[in-house]
Image (cartoon, rainbow, N blue to C red):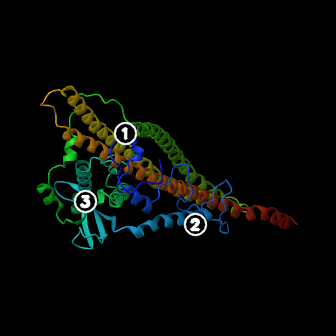
Amino acid sequence: MSASTPKTLCTSGQQSIQDICHPLSAEESVRTPSPDVGNTTGSIGEKDLSLPNGTPVDTSSPASSSSLLNRLQLDDDLDGETRDLFVTVDDPKKHVSTMETYITYRVSTKTTRVEFDLPEYSVRRRYQDFDWLRIKLEDTQPTHLIPPLPEKFVMKGVVDRFSEEFVETRRKALDKFLKRVADHPVLSFNEHFNVFLSAKDLNAYKKQGLALLTKMGESVKYVTGGYKLRGRPLEFAAMGDYLDVFTQKLGTIDRIAQRIIKEQSEYLVELREYGPVYSSWAGFEGPLQEPLEGVAGCVANCAGALDELTEDMSDDFLPVLREYVLYIESMKTVLKKRDNVQAEYEAKLEAVAFRKEERTAQPPTDVEKCQDRVECFNADLKADWDRWQNNKRQDFRQLLTGMADRNIQYYEKCLSAWESIIPLLQDRPENTKTETS
């Protein structure tokens, strides 16, 4: 996909969808550059990254990967200077009543937008409120990709939905959901989103509701009566093929990662049983007591490092995979909606052609409006696809850099622990000779 885009929406006609530019995509390309996958020139933090291919890097610190990750995150945060809406989800609280038990989260907002009455808001929302917002966004913005929410009840490896682990994992996912909506050039101006962030009593607002669905939303829900689509344009067919392959890759990585975490957890149990054996043994060995206790301490340090690595993988790596699996489903849903709009347009064209000689034929203006909806849907979807690809590159670059960093830290801790007992083992023969002489 082209990195440069025109500044105006192209007119309708026999042109490729690649040539049809979303009116906001040019502006977005300035705020958040979206290079092609194969082109890394000018990508965030590229000048600082160090890879095995010989790219220069400052190696003065042994923990250079940590500094690289920090610089990468800092560079990503620089884009925040152009934003005017900041949202944070934190402070989960448990509420217990005779009817139900649930968790609420504090949603804090800072903004300079004139659509808001105040510059700052702080409200509490529960999961079903986030779910309501997403449904409203899907209904009123059918041509756009809506970020996914975490699963409602079941999350892999978690049984108790009120446990600290589950609540914190969900909080992070809800925070990311709102941040993605707030960063979107269209979704962030949605009236339902405004109410979600600012209304003190959201339940009262839910009962009242806003206006009915837009005409676009009604059009997307149009039933084509079994009409078979002639075929997706090549651009959108390629999107569907990419999503199918991406789903397979993520599924394989997720299964392997789950097995690795299970094996690491089992190994951790063994290490925690392994170390104390050396401690108890040391009590029976006078000359070997010190090195044996050193080995016990070394094993304990390695177990602690492995525990941190496994926790990081469960808390940071797997949730990103789950989010993008859900993202793929959302993208497929939008593609199906686009197909429905195209099918409606093709059906009306055929109806006009069939009744062309009749005076009661369908007005051409109606067909033209339907064509405009198709082109609008195509442009919106293509712009969101570009944004999604750009976000995906940033997310996975940061994810993989962090994973490399944590693995380096783990092995460095294990190396340091084992090196610490070498002097004890090397000095022992000399001490033995001195005692025998």
Q: Secondary structure at mark 1?
A: loop
Above or below residue 282? Residue 243 is: above
Whether residue 311 is visible, yes or no, is: no
Alpha carbon separation for disc pair 3 and 2: 37 Å
Report which residue position mark 1 lands on. 14
Contact (Cβ within 8 Å) of mark 3 with mark 2 = no
Disc number for residue 193 = 3
Alpha carbon separation for disc pair 1 and 3: 37 Å
Disc 1 or disc 2, which is closer to the eye?
1
Residue 138 is left or right of residue 328, and the answer is left
Query: Looking at the picture, which amino acid does disc 2 mark?
Result: Ser
Above or below residue 403? Residue 200 is: below
How packed mark 1 is, by other alpha carbons closer than 10 Å (few <14, some 14-19, many 20 or more), is few
Disc 3 or disc 2, which is closer to the eye?
3
| Spot occupied by residue 205 in the image (x, y as percentages of width and height) | 14, 59
Residue 344 is left or right of residue 400, and the answer is left
Report which residue position mark 2 lands on. 67
Q: Residue at x 23, y 73 (%)?
A: 118
**Foreground of the two, 203 or 211:** 211
| Spot occupied by residue 38 in the image (x, y as percentages of width and height) | 55, 48
Residue 125 is left or right of residue 279, and the answer is left
Query: Looking at the picture, which amino acid does disc 3 mark?
Result: Phe
